[in-house]
Amino acid sequence: MSKSERFWDKTASKYDQIEMKDAQTYQNVINRTKKYLKSCDIVMDFGCGTGIIANEIAEDVQELHAIDISANMIEIAGKKAYDRSIANISYVHTTIFDERYKEGSFDAILAFHILHLLENEQVVLQRINELLKPGALLISATPCMGEKRILKGLLSVAGKVGLMPAIQAFKINDLVDAFKRGGFSIVETDCLNPRSQEYFIVARKN
């Protein structure tokens, strides 16, 4: 088990409480994402956490494949879906490189609050591109903490001493460039929260 997986397993029981301190931004992400989805879509939620977003958009798509590296997160997400009788979500403890997911399988892939946690976002963006159908969408929300110098420094220290996983302090222009290098064209870019510098980006597979 990786350090990252252990961290998120320990965090899972408190995750909803922590994240819902910014419930308004979450609702904004959900509402904006729904505008891009169709009832016939097959969608992946990459890094789904406890299903905060997946369980809210399931009714808008045909199938939702939700994955996360934390088994505890997946367990909580699955229980919430079961309690709400949501039948079209498959919650799986795995990575995006799982060979069960074939090239050209998805109409959209969601990547919320995950890209800044990756060791190599370019490799993952290439994998996302492979999994998407031609012209399909990558819909993301990512804090770009490189825009805030003090916060960037604090997070760097916290990652080095093992208090939390290493976090990439993107600047928005760098993140947009990474999408383009990954074979995507930008459809929409918007700052959801000036305080956290969280950006909503929608990109289309070239």
Image (spheres, helix red, strand yellow):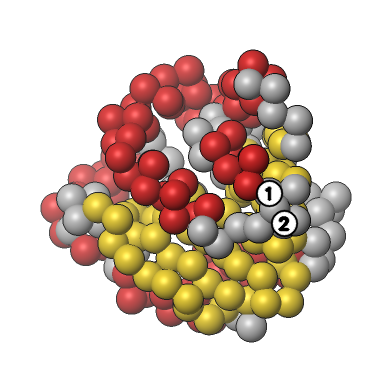
Q: Is residue 156 left or right of residue 118?
A: left
Mark 1 → mark 2, Cα distance in angstroms? 5 Å
Q: Are marks 1 and 2 in contact (CB under 8 Å)?
A: yes
Instruction: Point out residue 23 in the picture as x, y percentages from the top left corner.
Output: 33, 35
Quick one: label 2, few (<14), some, or many (20+) residues within 10 Å?
some
The numbered disc on residue 91 is none
Q: Which residue appears farthest toward the left when viewing the image?
A: 150
Instruction: Point out residue 127 in the picture as x, y percentages from the top left corner.
Output: 68, 65
Instruction: Name the image quarter holding residue 79.
Output: top right
Frontmost residue, 88 versus 104: 88
Instruction: Name the image quarter holding residue 201.
Output: bottom left
Residue labelled with disc 1: 61
Residue labelled with disc 2: 41
Q: How many marks?
A: 2
Q: From the image, which quarter does the N terminus lie in?
A: top right
Quick one: label 1, few (<14), some, or many (20+) residues within 10 Å?
some
Instruction: Point out residue 106 in the picture as x, y percentages from the top left corner.
Output: 74, 60
Amino acid type at image mark 2:
Asp
Which numbered disc, 1 or 2, marks the residue that appears first in the sequence? 2
Answer yes or no: is residue 6 visible: no
Instruction: Look at 25% across and 52% down and name the residue there.
Output: 193
Q: Is residue 93 left or right of residue 195?
A: right
Q: Is residue 123 left or right of residue 112?
A: right
Frontmost residue, 108 versus 125: 108
Instruction: Point out residue 136 in the picture as x, y percentages from the top left corner.
Output: 66, 70
